[in-house]
Amino acid sequence: MSDVYEIYDYKWDSDTEIMHIEAEVSDSVLACRATQYEPEQWTHGKCYAEVLWPDDDLVPVKAESKESLLAYCNNTSGIEWTLIPLDNSIEEAELCDVL
């Protein structure tokens, strides 16, 4: 189970009862491939997940509810996180001496 470090954004659709969550998740980006002597190494990355959220009382609508959503994500093992593709524009700007 991956750890969730930070919740960036969340939206709840009352029609479908689906919560869309964007968060910083551990072990989501392959940092180093495995070698003969070392196992592969993973690092954190920005991911999203869509979770069935059936109880209207649990819908986090206040800013302080972000912490309760973070606790829910860290305590629920069935959430399947999908990596959001990395944006290389900053790296390209640094290479071109724009930044």
Image (spheres, helix red, strand yellow):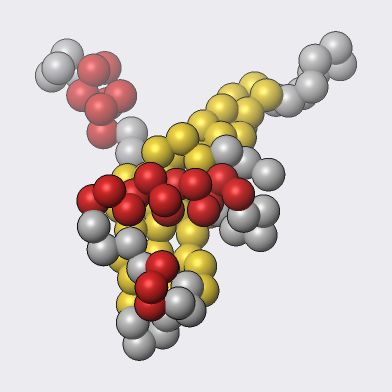
Q: Is residue 23 in sight in this rendering?
A: yes
Name, please, the residue furthest toward the right. Answer: 36
- Image coords of residue 71 (percent x, y): 49, 47
- Image coords of residue 15 (percent x, y): 35, 87
Name, please, the residue furthest toward the left. Answer: 98
Residue at position x 30%, y 24% in the image: 91
Q: Quadrant of the C terminus?
A: top left
In the rendered image, the vertical position of residue 27 relative to residue 15, given as above or below: above
In the rendered image, the vertical position of residue 64 relative to residue 50, given as above or below: above
Q: Nearer the viewer, residue 12 or 67?
A: 67
Taking 44 as reference, is 75 left or right?
Answer: right
Taking 59 as reference, is 25 left or right?
Answer: right
Q: Residue 21, located in which quarter of the rendered image?
A: bottom left
Taking 3 as reference, is 50 left or right?
Answer: left
Residue at position x 56%, y 28% in the image: 43
- Image coords of residue 32 (percent x, y): 64, 22
Residue at position x 33%, y 82% in the image: 14
Q: Residue 19, located in which quarter of the rendered image?
A: bottom left
Q: Is residue 29 in sight in this rendering?
A: no
Q: Nearer the viewer, residue 29 or 49?
A: 49
Name, please, the residue furthest toward the front. Answer: 57
Residue at position x 42%, y 53% in the image: 69
Q: Nearer the viewer, residue 57 or 4?
A: 57
Please count the marks in the image: 0
Q: Quadrant of the N terminus?
A: top right
- Image coords of residue 93 (percent x, y): 21, 24
